[in-house]
Image (cartoon, rainbow, N blue to C red):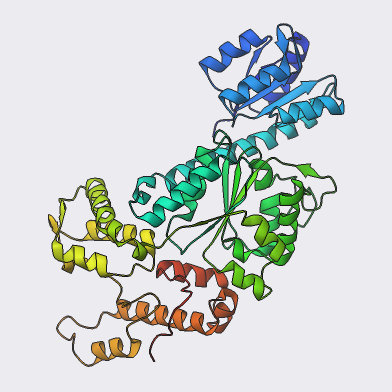
């Protein structure tokens, strides 16, 4: 794997030789310039992975060059070298977007450590950007003519004008909460800076603090080096906390401090780190109810919910179901080179009548699976394998289904063993979830499953909490 490309900017030939050799000895590809004019030309011909920039240049100020770089390439990390390492210069450099600064004279090890950290942060930023692009390539699927969605879009547009206003996005799983968070970011003045997302339910609570706030070397057993957290990497941009209701009370306190003071300490650290970040959060839980029950801090709840944004479920905007279905069918037909071109009236009625507990995500998954596996030009009701539900949260009786299989009703085709097992697993998870009021930790204990395995199965079977679910019939 090739090493990173570094642009070194310093007007002193001896410094360029000294630093360039240290970097090349580590395997980096290094180009060097001695003025702002040469630097502009170098940046225009081939963008580096990192810039190491001197503060004093013969034709201008290094901080002005830094600002110019960050305006054009906000994600490009810049390390500033200065012989004037006073606090005022450091603050100005960080405010202008420098990754960090190093005071001359410095040891090779000091610079190389900074270079490694900056490149790691840049790599993570690019990965976040790649994942974000993949996640939101389908954003037009969420366009809608329904009044409730139009209201959500209007709120998003208004909120985007507020540079720091906190937003709590509420709605069921699969409705597009992440899309709205990204939409607000892209319409805001922070659009040129990172949009960083973290799912609070997907990371064990003991690791979530380190992911969010970073840690110092030696803070715990595996902390072999200092690590920046997502809060730092999102500075200047937006941090999106999905499934905020899963955050433990200790982290809730630390997050509240960030919202109030805009600073925090890394795990194992003693110095306050100041960040400029907009925090948005999302949940499919009733956080107000969690507050009343003591499971979520009231002060944090109101700091997060400065502006509430509700994303309606698909069953509340039935007029969108058929247009979205046609869009999904056309796209997957093109992707899989299948001849599907039309949805029959019967299939349209079937799609419209279904309650879509998994919302747009479930609709998209259905069409991806259907177009890939089925054959034909017109999509008929027989092609649609919808879950046997009459309304959200209500399952066809498991006993009835098993009786159908074992009584010989399906004897001609035999007993679909895998399908029966899947239904059994799904029914067990649903019943245990109802019994524990959708508390995942208690549900996992009841089923003797690890929590990550429970989450995997819930995602596999598209099981989401239903606030007014009815227990399946015995």
- x%, y% of residue 313? 40, 63
Q: Answer yes or no: is residue 288 visible.
A: yes
In the rendered image of this protein, does residue 308 appear above or below residue 15?
below
Q: Quadrant of the C terminus?
A: bottom left
Q: Quadrant of residue 282?
A: bottom right
Q: Quadrant of residue 411?
A: bottom left
- x%, y% of residue 128? 54, 43
- x%, y% of residue 124? 59, 41
The residue at the far right in this view is 86
Q: Please tell me which residue lies in front, 108 or 318.
A: 318
Q: Answer yes or no: is residue 215 visible.
A: no
Number of callouts in the render? 0
In the rendered image of this protein, does residue 32 appear above or below residue 436?
above
The residue located at (22%, 50%) in the rendering is 333
Q: Is residue 399 left or right of residue 333?
A: right
The residue located at (45%, 58%) in the rendering is 311
In the rendered image of this protein, does residue 340 appear above or below residue 236?
below
The residue located at (34%, 61%) in the rendering is 317
Q: Is residue 412 left or right of residue 353?
A: left
Q: Is residue 257 left or right of residue 168?
A: right
- x%, y% of residue 330? 23, 49
Q: Please tell me which residue lies in front, 28 or 186.
A: 186
In the rendered image of this protein, does residue 75 appear above or below residue 263?
above
Q: Please tell me which residue lies in front, 139 or 308.
A: 308
């Amino acid at each position: 794997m090739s090493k990173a490309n570094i642009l070194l900017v310093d007007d002193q030939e001896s410094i360029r030789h000294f630093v360039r050799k240290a970097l090349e000895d580590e395997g980096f590809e290094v180009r060097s310039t001695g003025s702002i004019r040469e630097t502009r030309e170098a940046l225009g011909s081939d963008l580096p992975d990192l810039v190491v920039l001197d503060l004093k240049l013969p034709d201008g100020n290094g901080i002005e060059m830094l600002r110019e770089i960050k305006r054009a390439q906000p994600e490009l990390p810049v390390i500033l070298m200065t012989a004037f390492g006073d606090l005022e210069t450091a603050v100005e450099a960080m405010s202008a977007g420098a990754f960090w600064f190093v005071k001359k004279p410095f040891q090779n090890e000091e610079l190389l450590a900074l270079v490694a950290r900056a490149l790691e942060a840049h790599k993570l930023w690019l990965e976040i950007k790649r994942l974000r692009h993949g996640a939101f390539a389908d954003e037009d699927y969420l366009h809608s003519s329904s009044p409730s969605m139009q209201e959500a879009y209007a709120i998003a547009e208004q909120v985007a004008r507020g540079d720091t206003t906190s937003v709590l996005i509420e709605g069921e799983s699969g409705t597009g909460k992440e899309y709205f968070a990204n939409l607000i970011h892209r319409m805001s003045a922070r659009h040129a800076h990172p949009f960083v997302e973290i799912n609070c339910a997907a990371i064990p609570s003991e690791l979530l603090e380190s992911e969010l706030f970073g840690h110092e070397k030696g803070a715990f057993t595996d902390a072999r080096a200092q690590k920046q957290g997502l809060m730092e990497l999102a500075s200047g941009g937006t941090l999106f906390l999905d499934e905020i209701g899963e955050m433990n009370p200790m982290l809730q306190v630390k997050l509240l401090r960030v919202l109030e003071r805009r600073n925090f300490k890394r795990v194992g650290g003693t110095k306050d780190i100041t960040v400029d970040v907009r925090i948005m959060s999302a949940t499919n839980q009733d956080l107000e109810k969690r507050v009343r029950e003591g499971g979520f801090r009231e002060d944090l709840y109101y700091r997060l919910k400065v502006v509430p944004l509700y994303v309606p479920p698909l069953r509340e905007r039935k007029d969108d179901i058929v247009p979205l279905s046609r869009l999904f069918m056309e796209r997957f037909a093109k992707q899989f080179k299948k001849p599907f071109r039309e949805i029959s009236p019967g299939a349209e009625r079937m799609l419209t009548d279904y309650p879509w507990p998994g919302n747009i995500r479930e609709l998209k998954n259905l069409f991806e699976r259907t177009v890939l596996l089925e054959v034909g030009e017109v999509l008929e009701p027989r092609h649609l394998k919808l879950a046997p539900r009459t309304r959200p949260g209500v399952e066809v009786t498991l006993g009835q289904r098993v009786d159908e299989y074992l009584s010989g009703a399906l004897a001609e085709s035999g007993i679909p063993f895998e399908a029966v097992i899947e239904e059994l697993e799904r029914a067990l998870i649903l019943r245990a979830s109802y019994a524990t009021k959708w508390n995942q930790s208690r549900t996992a204990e009841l089923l003797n499953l690890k929590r990550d395995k429970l989450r995997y199965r819930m995602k596999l079977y598209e099981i989401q909490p239903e606030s007014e679910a009815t227990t399946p019939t015995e």
